Amino acid sequence: MTKVEIRIELKKGVADPEGRNTQKTLESLGFTGISKVSTVKLFEIDMDMPAEQAKGVAEDMCRKLLANPVIQNYKISVS
Amino acid sequence: MKPEDVKVCVIRIEGTNCEDEMAGAFEMVGAKAEKVHLKQLLGQAPADMRRSLEDYDILAFPGGFSAGDYVRAGAIFAARIKAGIGSDLKRFIEEGKPVLGVCNGFQILVELGLLPAMEGTMSEVPTAALYNNDSGRFECRPTVLRNDNRGKCIFTSGIKSKQMLSIPSAHAEGKLMSMDPDFVQKLEDNDQIVFRYVCPDGSDAVYPWNPNGSPSDIAGICNPAGNVLGMMPHPERVMTRYTHADWTRNPGPAEGDGYRIFSSVIESLTRN
């Protein structure tokens, strides 16, 4: 079995209100020295196929559903 | 065709919650509206409940949420449609039949690649996104829209150019985004901008009158053919003046500001 991790990140320049809000709240709790908080989404998908094939399928999944190329980048890692 | 012969499919899945108002709005302008679950169109229903998209004259995507809005708002509904009835829907639009998406419905149309669809009817991957409001919050209040369409959109054919309409907004992801730096200009050139948010005095909108930070205050766009409209605010919620927030202070016609959007499309279909 192949374990695929798909990390969906916001593209550079796309505002991250959730991250910004979280940073503000952390700072209000007294945490200092935070320069940035970013939110990412992680999908873990178990696939019954060899790693190389799973990577290709994961690419297709990102294109068809998991990422919107206008606002998001994706990174796929296979183990 | 008479108004009562116009059959409207108000499509829903789990999480859709504005289908009653949407169907009611079409009924108020004389059409025959039916709330149809996607499964009924996919053949995953008892025989007497199965429906076919081609039997309808208008398709409406109501607001609310869909499938928990997991992944992204509207993404799962869009993917299910694409996989199940994608080619039927493409044909429906190419035949010139009107499609309306409100709020989550607009998000679904964008995720489906049906809007802005500057090249072809439906793009393979989305070419725009409706992303989190600049405020980072769910924004829910009356907004003022101006009809900026120059005549292409079938849903505003009975609304005067530059007319202002008070229509409520209620969304968390309504900021229209694209990777193309000339996106707004291209929409403008193609006459695809239908509604812009404005301040009540008609001047350019500032927050909160533009609730989401959309560039050029865009609230609704249509496809290049003009038969697919997506908009964030909810016209189906203001079919009579009594559901406008300030109705006791502003006596006016019985008709609410959303009425004309629905009557325009029915009038265009029944004119011939």
Image (cartoon, rainbow, N blue to C red):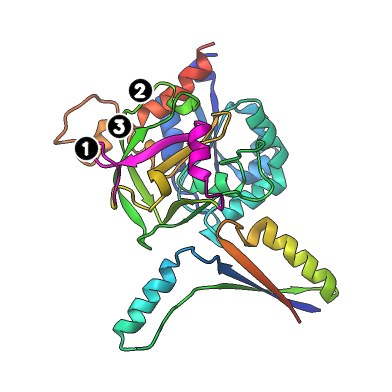
Identify the residue position indicated by label 1 in the image.
B201
**Local SS, label 2:** loop
Identify the residue position indicated by label 2 in the image.
B160
The answer to whether residue B66 is visible is yes
> Position of B105 compared to B236: left or right?
right
| x then y, percent, for residue B84 | 71, 46
- Identify the residue at the far left of this view: B249
Q: Give the residues drawn in magenta, as a range.
A: B179-206
Question: Quadrant location of the N terminus of chain B?
Answer: top right
**Local SS, label 1:** loop
Name the one closer to the observer, B28 or A74. Answer: A74
Q: Is residue B158 magenta?
A: no
Determine the CA span between mark 3 and mark 1.
Answer: 10 Å
Name the one closer to the observer, B198 or B258. Answer: B198
Pinpoint the chain carrying mark 3. B
Specify the label residue B164 is tagged with: 3
| x then y, percent, for residue B54 | 67, 29
